[in-house]
Amino acid sequence: MKSFFKYVLATVTGIVISFFLLVIIGVIVVGAWVGSVVSDKETAVASNSVLHVKLDYQITERTIPNPFEELDVPGFKTEKSVGLDAILEGISGAKTDDRIKGIYLDLSGVSASFATLQEIRDALVDFKTSGKFIVAYGDHYTQRAYYLVSTADKVYINPEGTIDFRGLASQTMFLKGALDKLGIEAQVVKVGTYKSAVEPLVLDRMSDANREQVSSFLGSIYDHFLSEVAAGRKIDKDSLFTISDQYLVRTAQDAVDYRLADGIKYKDELLTELKTRIGIEESDDINVVSLSKYKPAPKTSGSATRDRIAVVYAVGEITSGEGNNDIIGSDRISRELRKVRRDDKVKAVVFRINSPGGSAQASDVIWREVDLLSKVKPVIVSMGDVAASGGYYIAAAADSIFAQPNTITGSIGVFGVVPNMQNLMNNKLGITFDGVKTGQYADFLTNVDRPLTADERRILQLEVNRIYDTFLQRVADGRSLSKAQVDSIGQGRVWSGEQALANGLVDRLGSINDAVAAAAKKAGLDDYRLVTYPAISSPFESLLGGSADRVSAWISQRELGEYYRYYEQMRAGVQLRGIQARMPFTLEIY
C-alpha cells in the first residue's frame, strides 16, 4: 500500500509539472506570435532624423527572424542578432534617404570578425560620399569598434574612456593535456605541413610551421587594419604602428593627443553637437532611428524584371545531410544549387561562403554542383570571414572568387582523427570489451577501444593522400594552375585574403555587393532582381527541430558562461569522424 501511494504521488507530481511546463511553453509561443506581429510593423522615420548605429549584438550573414527577441519572460532570454545583409541595406538606404541627415556611431564592442567589419566599414565610407555626417561617441572603443569609427568625421570619447589600440593577437586552445588525463589518444593522419587543425589534439603548443603561418596571415590582416585606420584618420601608418606597439594610448587625453580621437565629451555635449549638425534647437529632441529597426524605402529599379541574380548562402561547418541556417548540409546546399541551375530566370549566381570547412566527402558533393552550375551560368564566389579548407574546396569551381583583404582562406589540406579510448575505458573506468569478427578489418574505424594497427594506419593514410590529391586537382582545374603549383601554396597553409590574391587563390578583393556587380556584368544584365537561397528556417521550426540538443546546449551555456566554447571545442574534437578538410577548431583574433 505504501508503494502504491508513492507511485500515485509521483504520477500526480509528474502531471502537475507537465501541466505547468505546457502553460509556460504556451505563454512563450503566444508571446512570440504577438512579438512577430508587432515586429512586422515598420518603424516610422521622421524628417531630420539621425541613424543610430549600435552593433552590440551577434552579426550573422543573414537576418533570421526571431519573434522571441522582444519576449520578456523571467528566466527566458534570447540573444539578439541582426544579419549583415540588413546592416548593409540599412546604411545604403540611409545614404539616399532624405529623412536621414547623418549617422551616430554608438560603438564600444563589436563581436564580428574582420571581414564582416570590412563590409560594414566599406558601407560607411560609401555613405560619406553623400555629404552626410558620421559622428562617433563611446565610453570605450575596442579595436574592432575603432576599425569602424575611424571612418567618422569626428570621433569623441568620454573623459574617463579609453581606446584599445595595442595590435592583434591570436590564441589556440590545446587539448592534449586534458585528453591525456582522460586517457584518450587522438590518432591522427594528415597531409600538409601547415595543416594545424589536429594540433590541439596532439600537441600542447604551436608547431613551428603553424606559428609561421599564423604570424604571416595575422601580420597581413594587421597591416591592412593599420592602412585603413591611417586613411580614415589621416595619420601616417608607421606612426600608428608605433602608437600601437608601445601602447601609448591609455587615457582619453592620450587618444586626443595622438589624434585617434577628435575630442573629449560627455554624452550631453555630444547630443548638443548632433542638434547643431541637424539644425534644431537645444530644447528640441533628436529624431533617432535605430539601425536594427530602420527599413529603407524599397528599391523599385528592377523589381518587375524577369532576370534574376541568385545569392546562395553557405554558412557554417560542412556536413552531410540537411544542415540548417548555421550548418552547411551537403544535401540542402546541393539541392539549392541545382534549383538555380534549372531556373531559366536566374542568369547568374553569387555563392556566398562563410565556412571553416568540414567533411571532405560532403565538400566534394557541393563542389560537383558548383562545377555543373558554372558550365551553364556565371558563378561568382564571395568569401566572408572564413572560406578555408572545405570552404575553399566548394569555391574552387567558380568562375571568379572575391575575398576581403582580411578573409581567412586557403588551408588546402586533409586530415583524419580516430580516438583511442582504451586507457579511459580499461584503466580509468574498469570497462573492457571482447567480441568476434569475420575478417581482420571488420571493426576498422568502428571501435574506439583499441589503437589502430600499423596496417590500419597505413590504409587510412593512403585514403587521406588520395583525397588531398583530389583536392589539389579540383583547385588546379578551377584556378588554371598545375597540381604542383597548388601543392606549393597548399599543404594546409592558411592565408589572408590579400595573400590569397597574390598567390592566385582568389581573383579580386571586394565585398558581396562587388561580387553581385561582377555577376551582373558577366551575365550582361543592367536590370535584375536579387533572390536569396536557401530559405531561412522559421523560428518555430528552429525551436521544435532538435529541441533536445538545443535545451542541452542552452543549459550548458548558462552554467559555463564564457567557458562554454572550451567545452564545445573539446566535445567536437573527441567526436570527429571521417576524413576532414577543415580549419583549426577555433581561431581567435583579438
Image (spheres, grey):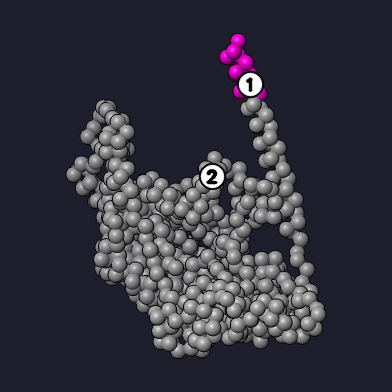
Tell me if mark 2 has few (under 14), some (14-19) or many (20+) residues whose alpha carbon lies within 10 angstroms of its own.
Answer: few
Secondary structure found at label 1: helix
Q: Amino acid at mark 1?
A: Leu
Secondary structure found at label 2: helix
| Magenta-drawn stretch, dominant element (helix, strand or loop) | helix
Please name the residue shown 69% across and 69% down the image.
290
Question: Which comes sooner in the sequence, label 1 or label 2?
Answer: 1
**Residue 280 in view, yes or no:** yes
**Mark 2 sits on what residue?**
555
301 is higher (above) or lower (below) than 68: below
Q: Is residue 7 magenta?
A: yes
Q: Which quadrant of the structure image shows residue 312?
A: bottom right
**Mark 1 sits on what residue?**
9
Q: Nearer the viewer, mark 1 or mark 2?
A: 1
Q: Which quadrant of the structure image shows residue 317?
A: bottom left
- Residue 155 percent coordinates (x, y): 59, 82
